[in-house]
Amino acid sequence: LGPEGWVEGELARLRERHLDRRLTVSGGGGGRCRIEGREYLNFSSNDYLDLATDPAVVAAAMRETEAGGAGATASRLMAGNLACHEELERRLAALKGYPAALLFGSGYLANVGVVPALVGRHDRVFADRLVHASLIDGVTLSGARLQRFRHNDPGHLAELLRAAPAGGRRLVVTESVFSMDGDLAPLPALAAAAAGGDALFLVDEAHALGVFGPAGSGLVSEENLQGRVQIAMGTLSKALGSYGGFVACSTALRELLVSTARAFIFTTGLPPAAAGAALGSLDRLAADPDRGSRLLALAGAFRDALRAEGLDPAGSASQIVPVIVGDNEKALAVSRRLREAGVIAVAVRPPTVPAGTARLRFSVTLAHTREELLRTARLTREALEAEGVR
Ligand SMILES: Cc1ncc(COP(=O)(O)O)c(C=O)c1O
């Protein structure tokens, strides 16, 4: 069979369980996409504020490319530290209400970089049961002991912190807006539990940035928790329509990360285009700070429309709206039917979500109209009925 003989067997097992994944080529920003010549309503993009194709944002990326070239050419610590990186870090820190910020190659790399810089083999990480894979991978790389608390349950977190043996550092991690359920973390109570248990608190704001908080600064700042959340992580890749990640933190912590975060040190600095686009998006957001509130109003209208069709948007309180199907194969079939009707809503399956909770995940964006949201709710009900799910 040769050294690759096992690959076909693995693929067959994935297919049997309807867990194989496929790539399709698509393009377009905001709420539309084009696949094989046909235009679809796109509910699977994270371009929440419709900025990825905004002419001013694209122009900012081009300006920065013309000034700085196509790539940063080296690690930030070698010769790849560009003026646009530092300007973007200053702007992100100011937006988030922190003294400093540090860019990473992506949100994934930010989490994989920062966790091992904070904790190691003799330490403990307390993570919400539903946190993103990048945080879990960061914990694995760190070698710290992982303990998971029940989703959005500060009482359980406090209990675990109390029961943990003394000694070593402690880190609590959660998301502020959960990527697959669209619900919000009870940040003040979690911050109190973390402080009571003498733990650092890291909040992943990947889906909150641009949407929640004053001028889109996120939920940590909406709750005024900068003093209790030592690390607010974010991404440039979703509402800001660009690519890259960052953490906002104290100047001392930034200094430490520059010297110890391997995912920062051993990789090339962000391309000027990515930094330029993010700066362009921050300008757009500053000029129109209500974009996030308008998006949340649209998402509320979508949830109402789903309920009017007899569907349950679960605990969603954000622009991310799930419709739980349960079975993997049924979720795929409903997603296929929606696609035939001109709507892209990807079926999210394990291991991205817990087993038995396969779902359609709708990301509402500012590019969607209320009429499109009503139509999509109706088409979703029809697709579920056609598959005998309800
Ligand atoms: C909660 C969360 N954290 C981190 C990431 C990673 O961000 P990025 O896409 O910038 O790598 C994502 C999304 O992919 C996410 O949903």
Image (tube, rainbow, N blue to C red):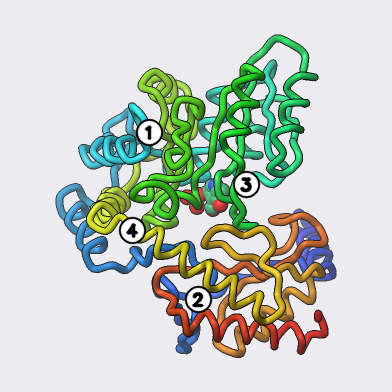
The location of residue 146, given as percent across then percent down, is 73, 30
Q: Quadrant of residue 352?
A: bottom right
Residue on which disc 3 sits? 132
Crowding near the residue tagged with mark 2, few <14, some 14–19, many ≥20 C-alpha atoms within 10 Å: many
Q: Nearer the viewer, mark 1 or mark 4?
A: 4
Tell me if mark 3 has few (under 14), some (14-19) or many (20+) residues whose alpha carbon lies within 10 angstroms of its own.
Answer: many
Of labels 1 and 2, earlier in sequence is 2
Query: What separation in Å lies between label 1 and label 2 (alpha carbons)?
Result: 32 Å
Q: Secondary structure at mark 1?
A: strand
For mark 4, give the secondary structure: loop
Give the labeled residue for mark 4: 290
Q: Amino acid at mark 1?
A: Leu
Q: Sequence-wise, which precedes: disc 1 or disc 3? A: 1
**Amino acid residing under circle 4:** Asp
Q: Nearer the viewer, mark 4 or mark 2?
A: 4
Q: Is mark 3 within 8 Å of ligand 1?
A: yes
